[in-house]
Image: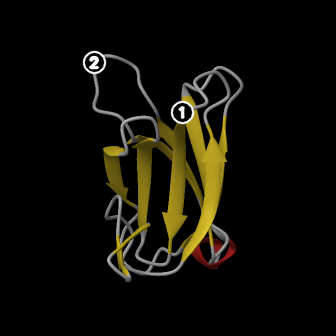
Amino acid sequence: MIQANSSYEPLVYGHMADAWGLAWHPRDHHLFATAADSSHVFYWNGRLRQLVAKCSMGPQMRARALCFSPIARHLAVGCADGTLKVLLVDCGSQPPLSEEVRLASASDRQ
């Protein structure tokens, strides 16, 4: 946020709920991902102050933790209910943050 005339103006608009997770891209340090209670994961370009992609994790899936793979092809997303999803970050033929695999939570196995 920047302050202009004693009021604050946002630089970018993003999550509509509490943000819990943040992960920096391992090679391109101006890229990062954020996760929130809104059940969305956002992929950002900090240099341009732009949203690159957004992914819905599904209803009631509160994302809590994020981690890029070493070559940044995948983004692991841990949710409050124990679910782990792995998203494709950028593979050329699919849009960024496409879901590749969902690992079941403990509640799914009951």
Q: On screen, 22 above or below 43?
A: below
Q: Position of residue 35 (x, y in %)?
A: 52, 63
Can residue 48 be seen from the camera position used here?
Answer: yes
Dot 2, how many residues are within 10 Å of its Cα: few (below 14), some (14-19), or many (20+)? few
Mark number, residue 104: none
Distance Cα–Cα, label 1 vs label 2: 23 Å
Q: Amino acid at mark 1?
A: His
Inspect the image, locate mark 2, and give the three-letter code of the amino acid beneath it.
Answer: Ser
- Residue at 28 percent across and 32 percent down: it is 95
* Residue that mark 1 sits on: 30
* Picture residue at 35% right of the left edge, 34% below the top: 96
The N terminus lies in which quarter of the figure? bottom left
Of the numbered discs in the image, which one, if any, rests on residue 93?
Answer: 2
Per the image, label 2 sits on a secondary structure element best described as loop
Q: Quadrant of residue 92?
A: top left
Vertical arrangement, residue 107 with respect to residue 24, above or below: below
Using a 10 Å C-alpha cutoff, classify the residue at mark 1 as few (fewer than 14 neighbours), some (14 to 19) or many (20 or more): some
Label 1 sits on a secondary structure element that is loop
Give how far across and how far down residue 102 sits, in percent: 52, 52
Q: Nearer the viewer, residue 83 or 45?
A: 45
**Relative horizontal placement of residue 86, taking residue 47 as reference (left or right):** right
